Image (tube, rainbow, N blue to C red):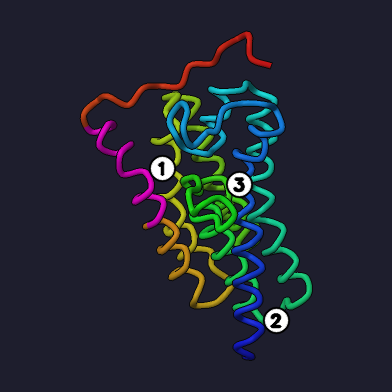
């Protein structure tokens, strides 16, 4: 495989992932910088706290799409060259966490990882999203829902993988990064101090 194509695929994914939906949406809506307000995390849950449901929904859609779009484009144009769209998806996830356009201060990567998985292995992606929705509905703990989805991802990937031997390795790395990014949440969960999300009915 041409090394230049691999580098271009990785760069394309990384630049797409570096478009921080939370920061862009907050600027458009005139909201505080999510990196300095609320939980200080530029992600959907924090935007929901700061700006309500509409801003959060746009943020979530943006984060998912920046995982889907670069990965899907490479998959459509190079369906037989698996490594190219695997690299595009993986680096879209990395770009979300460490965005070059926003001083490398990004989110935790859950929504973007879900978008990538939906293209890599759609059933795996749907299973992880389903797990997140179920756990969040029961506990109202976004972090616990994310960790549950991360736990399911490698198991489902090993069971359902049709995209090559590199896929489980990349999924394991993504899961490791998700756990690392949630390390403070894990500490609060273990100590019973993680607070359940409360919806403000006046949010729009």
Q: Residue furthest right?
A: 77
Task: Answer with the quarter of the image where residue 196 lies.
Answer: top left
Check whether the beta carbons of the residues at disc 3 and disc 1 lie within 8 A of each other.
Answer: no
Residue 192 vs 89, above or below: the answer is: above
Range shown magenta: 177-190
The disc placed on residue 32 is none
> Can you identify the residue that label 2 sits on?
80
> Can you identify the residue that label 3 sits on?
20
Residue at position x 70%, y 81% from top? 80
Q: Secondary structure at mark 3?
A: loop
Image side of residue 143 versus residue 92, left or right: left
Image spot of residue 89 (x, y percent): 60, 64
Residue toward you, 32 or 51 = 32
Q: Nearer the viewer, mark 3 or mark 1?
A: 3
Image side of residue 174 versus residue 9, left or right: left
- Marks 1/2: CA distance? 32 Å
Q: Residues within 10 Å of mark 3 (few under 14, many from 20)?
A: many
Residue at position x 55%, y 53% from top? 96
> Can you identify the residue that label 1 sits on?
148
Q: Earlier in the sequence, mark 3 or mark 1?
A: 3
């Amino acid at each position: 495989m041409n090394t230049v194509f691999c580098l271009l695929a990785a760069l394309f994914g990384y630049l797409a992932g570096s478009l921080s939906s939370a920061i862009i949406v907050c600027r458009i809506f005139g909201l505080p910088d999510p990196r300095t307000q609320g939980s200080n995390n530029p992600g959907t849950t924090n935007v929901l706290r700061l700006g309500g449901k509409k801003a959060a929904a746009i943020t979530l859609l943006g984060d998912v799409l920046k995982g889907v779009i670069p990965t899907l484009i490479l998959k459509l144009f190079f369906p037989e060259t698996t490594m190219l769209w695997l690299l595009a998806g993986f680096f879209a996830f990395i770009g979300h966490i460490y965005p070059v356009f926003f001083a490398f201060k990004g989110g935790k990567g859950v929504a973007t990882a879900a978008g990538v998985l939906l293209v890599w292995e759609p059933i795996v992606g749907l299973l992880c999203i389903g797990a997140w929705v179920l756990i969040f509905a029961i506990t109202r703990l976004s972090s616990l829902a994310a960790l549950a989805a991360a736990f399911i991802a490698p198991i489902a990937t090993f069971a359902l993988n049709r995209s090559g031997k590199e896929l489980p390795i990349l999924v394991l790395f993504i899961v490791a990064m998700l756990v690392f990014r949630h390390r403070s949440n894990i500490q609060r969960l273990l100590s019973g101090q993680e607070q359940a999300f409360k919806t403000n009915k006046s949010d729009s």
